[in-house]
């Protein structure tokens, strides 16, 4: 079963066609500019694996209208350089849009949501562990502050570490 065309895809592509070609594809008109714009719309959606009926529903058309439009497009584009240029322009702008959902099917979006949810939970666990560590080591902040204020080099830090180990192991009273 092919996916339905999401509203964000419809709006995005219609807006691109309007800005690039100056044509509102939702207006029912037989003028050549409108027909060509709808053919470009049909072709791009069909290239993105949307079914004939799903595409047709977005413009309140019959699936046969979409099939006919794509066939007409494929025939005309061989001879009509302007139509080909329009198609390439709209397709390039459409592919360059920042919204990743534009190119994802509903199933892909659902799968991506699950993946992102797992990553989110993992990150939240990491944050909890870091907060726990921060709370645990907070009691040593005075010792760390004293050592940090001294600006000790690595060699002196090793000496301090050795002396702290001796003190904590009971070698010094």
Image (cartoon, rainbow, N blue to C red):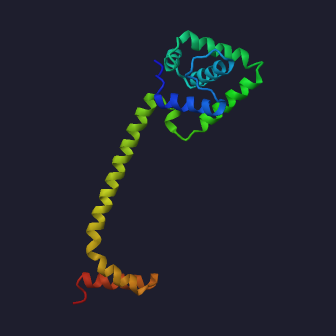
Q: Nearer the viewer, residue 37 or 51?
A: 37
Instruction: Using the rendered view, name the quadrant where residue 160 is placed.
Output: bottom left
For the point 36% across and 42% down, the residue is 117
- Position of residue 114 relative to residue 132, above or below, is above
**Quadrant where the image shows the C terminus:** bottom left
Task: Give the side of residue 51 with respect to residue 107, left or right.
Answer: right
How far from the left and from the top, in percent, is residue 45?
Answer: 57, 24
Q: Quadrant of residue 48?
A: top right
Q: Is residue 1 above or below residue 18?
A: above
Q: Where is residue 99 in the image (x, y as percent from the top left)?
A: 52, 39
Quick one: 17 or 44, which is closer to the camera?
Answer: 17
Q: Residue furthest bottom?
A: 173
How many marks overall?
Answer: 0
| Residue 79 at x, y percent in the picture | 78, 18
Residue at 40% x, 40% y is 115
**Residue 67: percent from left, percent from top:** 59, 12
Residue 142, compared with residue 96, is above or below; it is below
Q: Is residue 126 left or right of residue 75?
A: left
């Amino acid at each position: 079963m092919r996916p339905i065309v999401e509203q964000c895809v419809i709006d995005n592509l219609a807006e691109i066609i309007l800005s690039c070609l100056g044509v509102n594809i939702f207006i029912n008109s037989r003028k050549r500019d409108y027909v060509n714009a709808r053919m470009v719309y049909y072709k791009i959606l069909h290239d993105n694996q949307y079914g004939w009926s799903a595409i047709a529903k977005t413009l309140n058309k019959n699936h046969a209208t979409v099939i006919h439009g794509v066939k007409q497009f494929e025939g005309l584009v061989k001879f009509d350089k302007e139509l080909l240029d329009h198609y390439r322009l709209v397709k390039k702008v459409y592919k360059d849009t920042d919204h990743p959902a534009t190119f994802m099917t509903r199933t892909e979006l659902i799968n991506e949501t699950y993946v992102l949810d797992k990553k989110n939970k993992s990150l939240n666990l990491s944050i909890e562990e870091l907060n726990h560590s921060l709370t645990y080591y907070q009691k040593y902040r005075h010792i760390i502050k004293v050592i940090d204020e001294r600006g000790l080099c690595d060699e002196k830090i090793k000496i301090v570490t050795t002396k702290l180990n001796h003190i904590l192991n009971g070698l010094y009273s």
